[in-house]
Image (cartoon, rainbow, N blue to C red):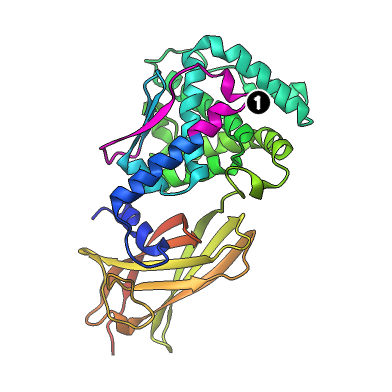
Amino acid sequence: MHARAHALVWIFVLTSCAGAVPRMYAAEEEAVSLANEALQKLVSTPLGQTLPNLPWKVDLVESWRVNASSNGRGQITITRGLAFVLRNHLGVWAAAIAHELGHSVMLYPASRPPFEAEFRRAYLAAGGSLTHAESALGSGAGSGGLFNRGGQRRIEYEADRLGLLLMAEAGYHPEYAVALDRRMRWATGDQAEFSEFLLSHPLWSNREERTVQIEGTALAIFNHRWPDPAQSPGGAPPPIGGIESVAVSRDAQAQALVLRVGLEIRNARNRQVRVAAVLLDRNGPVRRPVAGMQAPDGSLTLNAMLPELDHGRAETALRIPVAVVAGKPRKLTAEVFLVADDWTLSIWLQPLEFPAQN
């Protein structure tokens, strides 16, 4: 199985409290419900009411592509693949739906002036300056036309920008847009930087950079309307984090391989943060009946808890006894996950070489 596809399957195993994989149809129903809940919140604010007056609705389509789209007439479609990736995180769904609403602002030019006027009013009320307001609004989708790939990328960036402003006023912390960018990046991947000119959509890493650039403007509106984030529709900001390094060493005395995992994280207060690893061979997960190291399906899984971790960088170690991989020398892969509660924040693939046992 392709490593990324395997990672998606393991999200459910690693983050399920009961250890059982949820039935997909129930997850899909919940996803559609959450997406529609976010949609109604987004279009009901003063800023959302400047959008085209359309019969807004979110529907599911039977596709495993990880995607969302809008038909320009009020119908937003999400795929089974996207439901699988975003799961039950309302704020991330709000970020995805807000992006599609951002497209409607560009598709219906008459909605742009009232949108900008309402944003200026909200930002100035939040204590922002008119200069910063104009900078946050940008200069539109740019030239090039819809059939120019560079123009298409500018349109996507602009939809991200407009969606971020819609999110903030509706009560979804701007960090949910960063969480969406990261989740989409490890679920669908980024192509090499030099090939972006061939793409119709920007790289997810570049989209995150653009989001961060104007996040402060959106945050001012969010904080003004929701002084206590926990009381907002989206709740507290999501955990954001990443695995920065995995170093492998051998503890000859203990007959174990040691994986030292370096990571960064924020917004993790009062969350259960852990690093988990699954061993893979050519046929999929390695299965061993080892007490304390066995997932519900029998796969060999390691966990390291990081209690009271809130913000910053940290390092933890996972120890894999050589004895659990019996036989001659073996080359395996460790699929390492950074998890906070039921959020899978980062995935790292690390080659391993197990020596022969004495």
Q: Which residues are magenta?
A: 39-66
Tell me if I can see residue 190 in this picture. Answer: no
**Quarter of the view holding residue 225:** top right
The image shows a total of numbered marks equal to 1
Q: Position of residue 267 (x, y in %)?
A: 62, 54
Give the residue at the far left of this rendering. 283
Check disc 1 and report the residue beneath it.
136
From the viewer's perspective, is residue 256 above or below residue 225?
below
**What amino acid type is highlighted by mark number 1?**
Ala
From the viewer's perspective, is residue 134 above or below residue 265?
above
Give the residue at the far top of this rendering. 110
Is 51 left, or right, of 131 in this rendering? left
Q: Position of residue 85 (x, y in %)?
A: 38, 47
Residue drawn at x 41%, y 49% is 87
Is residue 45 within the magenta segment? yes
Quarter that holds the N terminus? bottom left
In this rendered view, identify the residue nearer to me: 310 or 148: 310
Is 290 left, or right, of 311 in this rendering? left
In this rendered view, identify the residue nearer to me: 339 or 23: 23
Q: Position of residue 313 (x, y in %)?
A: 61, 61
Quarter that holds the C terminus? bottom left
Residue drawn at x 54%, y 19% is 51
Is 191 left, or right, of 154 in this rendering? left
In this rendered view, identify the residue nearer to me: 226 or 214: 226
Tell me if I can see residue 80 in this picture. Answer: yes
Label 1 sits on a secondary structure element that is: helix
Callout 1: few (<14), some (14-19), or many (20+) C-alpha neighbours within 10 Å? Answer: many
Q: Position of residue 115 (x, y in %)?
A: 61, 18
Residue drawn at x 70%, y 21% is 120
Is 278 left, or right, of 208 in this rendering? left
